[in-house]
Image (spheres, rainbow, N blue to C red):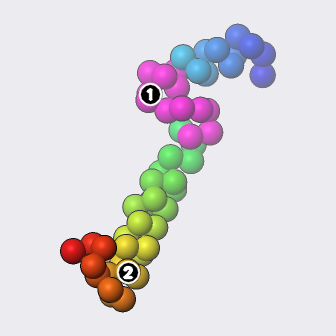
Amino acid sequence: MTAQQYAEQAAANIQYDTRVDFDTNYQPPAADSFTTAPTSVSQRPSSGGGSCCH
């Protein structure tokens, strides 16, 4: 990848609000993992104590 290609990728990524090139390819699985991970983590304290969530 040349500097010009990298600059074009960076410009395209800025237009699509993505930080780097591989974020566009891994965005759907990353979004799925980020949506499922906080719920599973937040359910553990809520089932144990629940004071932090309520």
Residue at disc 2, secondary structure: helix
* Residue 40 falls left or right of residue 3: left
Q: Residue tagged by mark 1?
A: 16
* Residue 35 falls left or right of residue 12: left
Q: Which residues are magenta?
A: 12-23
Counting labels gives 2
Q: Give the residue at x 40% y 82%.
A: 44
Q: Nearer the viewer, residue 49 or 22?
A: 49
Q: Position of residue 24 (x, y in %)?
A: 54, 38
In the displayed image of the protein, which residue is found farthest to the top? 4
Q: Residue tagged by mark 2?
A: 45
Q: What is the three-letter code of the residue carrying label 2?
A: Pro
Where residue 8 sits, quadrant-wise, is top right
* Residue 35 falls left or right of residue 24: left
Q: Give the residue at x 45% y 54%.
A: 31
Q: Position of residue 11 (x, y in %)?
A: 54, 17
Q: Is residue 18 on the magenta stretch?
A: yes
Image quadrant for the C terminus? bottom left
Q: Nearer the viewer, residue 7 or 47?
A: 47
Q: Position of residue 33 (x, y in %)?
A: 49, 62
